[in-house]
Amino acid sequence: MLAVVLFLAVTACAPSGPERSSEAVAPIDAVTVGSFNFPESRLLAEVYAQALESAGILVARQPQVGPREIMEPALEQGLVDVVPEYLGSALAYLEPGASVASLDAAAARQRLSELLAERGLVVLSFAPAENQNGVVVRRDTAERYGLSSISDLAPVAGELVFGGPPECRERPFCLIGLQNVYGLNFKSFVPLDSGGRGTRAALAGGEIDVGLLFTTDGHLAGGDLVLLADDRSLQPVENVVPVARRQVVERYGTALVERLDRVSALLTTTELSDLNRQMTIDEQDPAVVAARWLADRGLLG
């Protein structure tokens, strides 16, 4: 029954039209690379998928599966084989209440590997690239209230509306963490998308005063938005890291592992921000952006 429910959830999140039909039904021997329901994840999934294809591995794509509450069971059920994860958030999901923020990337990967091994999953090498949750305000809001860090929000949070993904209410690095670590109690919360176009539009239009965006969002370089410093270190390390089903790793061995590890080793935070800019600001197709980055680094062919 769980597999049926997850299949429906996964395919419901896939795009409609011709693209959906080609991505939702995968050849039985294909490695299915999935992504969470936000643009950067789909871009990363495309980077890793094309890298695997260049190693001669048949790949299917399952974009926009959903949040971690859907993705992690989908991995366990074999509906998805590989997903680009984020160290701290994945670990916090699996081990609620643990002191994730105190771990460095190597320690976080080790603990994540231990937890996922029990579920038949393998954590590969993590990338230097890191993408954390970022608390963002418009520049005029920052100037009006003198905001440069998240702590600065404390005296005025009760006057401000906060916007973020629906799951933000339950996440330790989102509203719960902002309340517990920073003592912030906002006027209200507006559920939006996962650090994407909807949140940026709500900020620009004044529907919200404070929003959750990702620190690799290409729009942060434009000057209209201010990323507030996480001065109490709420956010954990969030290095990009592929997670794969053990059966798939055993089937393809070094051909899969070495190719994914090569990609991760070359992916930096600066480059990830630039890839996001090309996709969200320049409006280039993620497949084109991914192919160009891989080709420039000799990772195709």
Image (tube, rainbow, N blue to C red):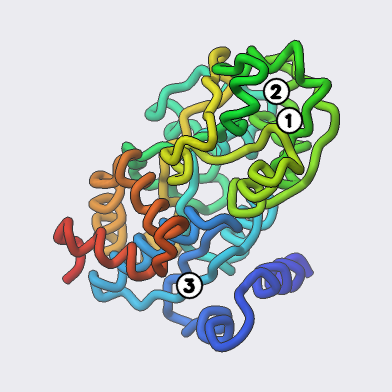
Q: Nearer the viewer, residue 23 or 175?
A: 175
Tell me if label 1 and label 3 are in contact, CB under 8 Å.
no
Q: Which residue is mark 1?
A: 175
State left or right for residue 135 relative to residue 117: right
Tell me if label 3 and label 2 are in contact, CB under 8 Å.
no
State left or right for residue 179 relative to residue 199: right
C-alpha separation, residue under disc 3 versus residue under disc 2: 35 Å
Q: Is residue 121 visible?
A: yes
Examine the rendered structure and indicate whether residue 139 appears above or below residue 206: above
Q: Nearer the viewer, residue 17 or 172?
A: 17
- Where residue 197 sits: x, y (%)? 60, 54
Amino acid at the residue labelled 3 = Arg
Which disc number belongs to residue 61?
3
Q: Residue at x 69, y 17 (%)?
A: 153
Residue 184 found in image quarter: top right
C-alpha separation, residue under disc 1 versus residue under disc 3: 32 Å
Q: Residue at x 70, y 42 (%)?
A: 164
- Where residue 33 sits: x, y (%)? 46, 66
Q: Nearer the viewer, residue 254 or 27?
A: 27
Q: Nearer the viewer, residue 221 or 179?
A: 221
Label 3: element kind = strand
Quarter of the N terminus within the rendering: bottom right
Front: mark 1 or 3: 1
Amino acid at the residue labelled 1 = Leu
